[in-house]
Amino acid sequence: MEIYFQLVRDAAALKTACEELQNAKFLGFDVETTNLDPYKGDLRLVQLSDGTNTKVIDLKPFAERGDLRTSDELAPLRALLASTRQTKIAHNAKFDTKWVRHHLDAEVGGVYDTYLASILISAGEGERRHGLADVVQYFLGRTLDKSEQVSDWAAAELSHSQVEYAAKDAAIMPEIREKLEERIVSDGLTDVLNLENECVMPIAQMELNGFYLDRERWREQLDKVRAKQKRTGDQLQDLLAAGVAQASLFGRTEINLDSQAQVTDALLNLGVPVPSTTRAWELQPLAEKYPVVAKLLEYRSVAKAAQSFGENILEFIERKTGRIHADFRQIGAPTGRFSCSNPNLQQIPHEAEYRRCFRGPEDANSSSPTIHKSNCGY
């Protein structure tokens, strides 16, 4: 795949490049970064292409002359990115828009995400992969070389192959959008994709804003949960002890409450008609008749809270912001619902004791991040 591209490294060339692209209807859009986390790395390249004319903007020389977020030299780029006159076509656009928002202080207008389009078209097919190379292969029948993806994007001078790789990723976007759009229209998914695309920028902003977690309150709550886990575990041991065939010389035989085999044996010895497994949904119907089953379900709930929502969640607090910046995926499950990871904030228990740990910091002021509204219907 041979393409024409221009490497842009100064203000005059940038102004001309943006003028050349401003009348395009569709622009392929991509970025290259030195890290996956915008709070830990630098934004090195921004690539824009109308499919034939591709501009690769190297931000390193601009950064050496001042703050990218306030640089007047980058004003034409910010204006072009923010404009809704051109549809910005990106693959996994949330990633690109987050970096532009954080490092250039720029919104991205008119987002079209080929990653989301591919997922919608697949309609929950578990085997289908949706990386850019996979989508290009599936819809265009071509191979897209991604070997430079893990190269050194912090290098003082980027190699020709690095710049060419970056240019190709942007240049192919208008073509892949056209192919995807044929299926989107024929499958009646236009409104759905529009909704998903409208959500990209707000979700990127939400991730950048993060969630403030009060460490002290969280540890206080964790201590309470651990105490409850021990108390509930002791009560469950007492109830199960009668079902243990043989007691030790030292009194009550301890059962490994995390061992399904030991718990099942004890329940059977107590006359509980244990189903094939001791999963919560199978045990729930027995809880009303058998107090030991109710206590087992209570113990497991508390133990899960202690394990899933313990000290480990504090490790996700970003040092620079004091907030948790989780990863939210719009179509994160085959059913189409949101998912969350690193950490999974969607699973935080709903009880007030947990919710009170998430709050605005005492010194919140007008410089705090703001959430931008959109028309997305979630």
Image: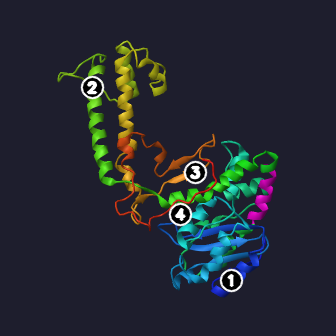
Chain-order first, disc 2 or disc 4: 4
Residue 279, can we see it? no
What separation in Å lies between label 3 and label 1 (alpha carbons)? 35 Å
- Label 4 sits on residue: 36
What amino acid type is highlighted by mark number 4? Leu
- Res. 83 image quadrant: bottom right
Of helix, strand and loop, which one carries label 4? loop
> Relative to 239, is 30 above or below?
below
> Relative to 103, is 345 above or below?
above
The image shows residue 256 at horizontal and vertical percentages of: 32, 29
Chain-order first, disc 4 or disc 3: 4
Q: Which quadrant of the rendered structure holds the N terminus?
A: bottom right
Provide the residue span drawn in magenta: 172-183
What separation in Å lies between label 3 and label 2 (alpha carbons)? 40 Å
Chain-order first, disc 1 or disc 2: 1
Tag in front: 1 or 4: 1
What separation in Å lies between label 4 and label 3 (alpha carbons)? 15 Å
What separation in Å lies between label 1 and label 4 (alpha carbons)? 28 Å
What amino acid type is highlighted by mark number 2? Gln
Q: Residue furthest bottom?
A: 12
Q: Nearer the viewer, residue 65 or 23?
A: 23
Of helix, strand and loop, which one carries label 1? helix
- Label 2 sits on residue: 235
The reply to whether discs 3 and 1 touch (Cβ–Cβ < 8 Å) is no
